[in-house]
Amino acid sequence: MTEPVPNWPGRMICLPRGARVWVAEASHGGGRQGAGKELVLCVHGMTGDATNWTDLMAELTPEFDVVAVDLPGSGFSPPPRRRRGYSITALATTVIELIEALGREPGRGDGHRGVHLIGNSMGGAVSVRVAARRPDLVRTLTLVSAALPDRRPHRQTAHFPLLALPVLGDWLVRQFGRLPAERRIAGVLQACYYDPSAIHPARVAASTEELRRRDELGYAIAAISGAARTLVAETLRPHAFSLWRDAERLRMPALVLFGANDRLVSPDLAGRAARAFRCARVMVLPDTGHLGQMEHPATVASLFRELAGSAGTAPGNGETPGNAGHRDPVDA
């Protein structure tokens, strides 16, 4: 195996309402890109962080100014002040503030015109809410195995309602945290990847060390149970207030990707997504699990470039024909 791409350097950004978030920034020289390039913002999923985007950022950085955020309570970002700060709506508010802050930075280039927003899993759910509430800030929307509401039972996520319970959930997370870090990482990789054996050993070792670091944080348990609680809450929302309703309102160009072998987000949702996202290209990627941007970064980057190239100049004003304009079938 060739050595993996090193994780990108980052910095802490203070937002207007007092939140602080860590962002990783991709550039050839290790500094901010700027120089008039269009801004891409990547949002990770539950238990993830900005390093989930390392390889995709490397693919895109020659053409785009690429930033990945650690959501509150994840990676190097401190936790929200209140537990409700882990909700999809609260996280979306944080991302909106971040987009506005990045757009105001001198030398950031094209950030004042909005971002190309990319979200994976729970970060995909957050990104949908951001796009629905502030379409003026989103040029295009790309979702990779977005955690959209699905009330059908799934073996890998059947424990989420228990994790969402205030006392029992924390106890279960605490018990899971007593397992060796190596065993927990192996379980996550098995659940999230189509082929865990393809992961570079250095990446596995880095993930294990990062998990050990998180174990020492006083808010690690609250972060996991808080994420589980918000995903369950979004699943139970009435349609009029759900992420699916948000999706139906969107008009910016979108790319909605599912993994054919995803054990956490069913690829069967592709059909519903094709109906809900009116300006989207919806695809199911073969030989892909829950982390398509990590398993196939070149493929995701290529599809994203097509999306960005087809987008209009103003954020939120896409007129792409969705799947009607492509030969790609939706495998639903």
Image (cartoon, helix red, strand yellow):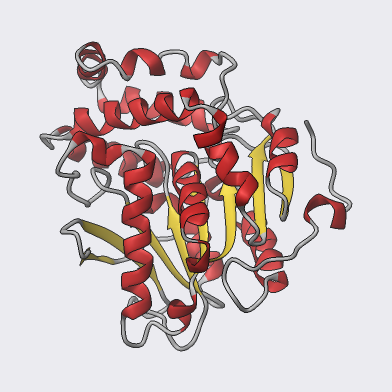
User: Residue at the spot x=31%, y=62% of the render?
Assistant: 23
**Quadrant holding the C terminus:** top right
Q: Quadrant of residue 53?
A: bottom left
Locate residue 255, reporting x and y percent: 66, 54
Locate residue 311, reporting x and y percent: 68, 71
> Which residue, as the protein is rendered here, is positioned at the far front?
240
Res 147 seen here: no
Direction from residue 161 to residue 9 in the image, left or right: left
Count of numbered circles in the view: 0
Q: Quadrant of residue 102?
A: bottom left
User: Residue at the spot x=51%, y=60% of the render?
Assistant: 117
- Residue 189 position (above or below residue 146): above
- Residue 77 position (above or below residue 245): below
User: Residue at the spot x=70%, y=28% of the render?
Assistant: 268
Locate residue 210, reporting x and y percent: 25, 42
Locate residue 287, reporting x and y percent: 69, 36
- Residue 186 position (above or below residue 152): below
User: Residue at the spot x=22%, y=51% of the render?
Assistant: 77
> Which residue, as the protein is rendered here, is positioned at the far right?
327
Res 232 seen here: yes
Q: Nearer the viewer, residue 50 or 276?
A: 276
